[in-house]
Amino acid sequence: MSDVTKIVSDIKNGNIKPIYFLMGEEPYYIDKISEYIENNILNEEEKGFNQIVLYGRDVSIEDIVDNAKRFPMMSERQVVIVKEAQDLSRTIEKLTSYVESPQRSTVLVLCYKYKTLDKRKKLYKAIQKTGVIYDSKKLYENQVAEWIRRILNGKNYKIEGKAALMLIEFLGNDLSKINNELNKLMLILPKDATITPSDIQDNIGISKDYNNFELRKAVGERDIVKVNRIINYFAQNQRSNPLVMTISLLNSFFTQLLIFHSLKDKSINNVAKVLRVPSFFVSDYSKAAKNYPMRKVSQVITLLREADVKSKGVGANALSAGDILKELLFKILH
């Protein structure tokens, strides 16, 4: 995030580079930087003749260089943006000669999503000298809740912890998808509103009571009645609650619980740091540790592996996904 802020700040202050190579696994910030450059370097009158958007699948490196070498018309600069530049990964090194001596009146932006340049090769080193390389890395899931709060705070909204976790469980750490859903909510809710689990359920379609977050919490608390309610719901709504996802999340929870048992320092900050979970999650592990001693946790992890194999059709004896889940949870809880 600090790198993004610096790039934007430098552009605002007139420190504009001739090359911006935006790469990495997380497309959200690549899009945000590209959009900022597209909207702010040239004014509306200048854009007509001096701003061009190309797509990697439709052009060659030679086409990009030809466009970049043009001189601007009635403007100090021109902007050339290459979207989906990862489609040029096989020939991207051909860009080196241009990068070594770029047209100073051109701002060339390459959006190289889901891939990165080889740091050992000439192109990477050349861009370091003449331009900006931004590597957009995926956030860990435990970092996404804080990211959601930061995005909403900047727009005068807040969100309850459970509501944020519902979004993360449903959408993972895909920031673009989460941002799209947040934008929908902000269109509906008034400024200064706090987004609640009910808002998520009513407007995005994620159940606030029947989801993997609630199942994991109920299992940790050994709340048999609540667990049975949730897994019966899952059995009836398998498309929205795939067994493989439930097993994966439970496996992560019990693996983290095993680590929790081994910690000497069980302070909130240390547990959150080691397990890579939000600090308000730590109490869930403390409660679960009382219900599941280390030996039981090891047994549960074995049960989860067996259920995972069954979910893939090995030794399941024609059991449905719902039956596999019910059998698994019965063994975990008893």
Image (spheres, rainbow, N blue to C red):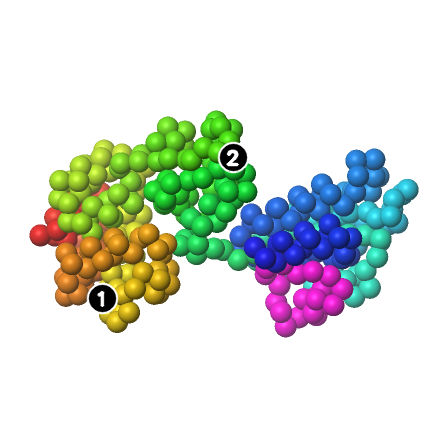
Earlier residue among tags 2 and 1: 2
Residue type for callout 2: Asn
| Quadrant of the rendering where the N terminus is positioned | bottom right
At horizontal 44% and vertical 54% (from top left) the residue drawn is 143
Q: Are marks 2 and 1 in contact (CB under 8 Å)?
A: no
Rendering coords of residue 37 (x, y %): 71, 46
Image quadrant in which you'd find residue 205: top left
At horizontal 24% and vertical 38% (from top left) the residue drawn is 234
Number of marks in the image? Answer: 2
**Residue for badge 2:** 183
Secondary structure at numbered mark 1? helix
Q: Is residue 278 left or right of residue 107?
A: left
Rendering coords of residue 113 (x, y %): 59, 52
**Residue for badge 1:** 261
Residue 19 is at least partly visible in this image: yes
At horizontal 45% and vertical 50% (from top left) the residue drawn is 146
Residue type for callout 1: His
Residue extending farthest left: 334
Q: Is residue 121 left or right of residue 226?
A: right
The magenta region covers 116-135
Q: Is residue 334 left or right of residue 277?
A: left
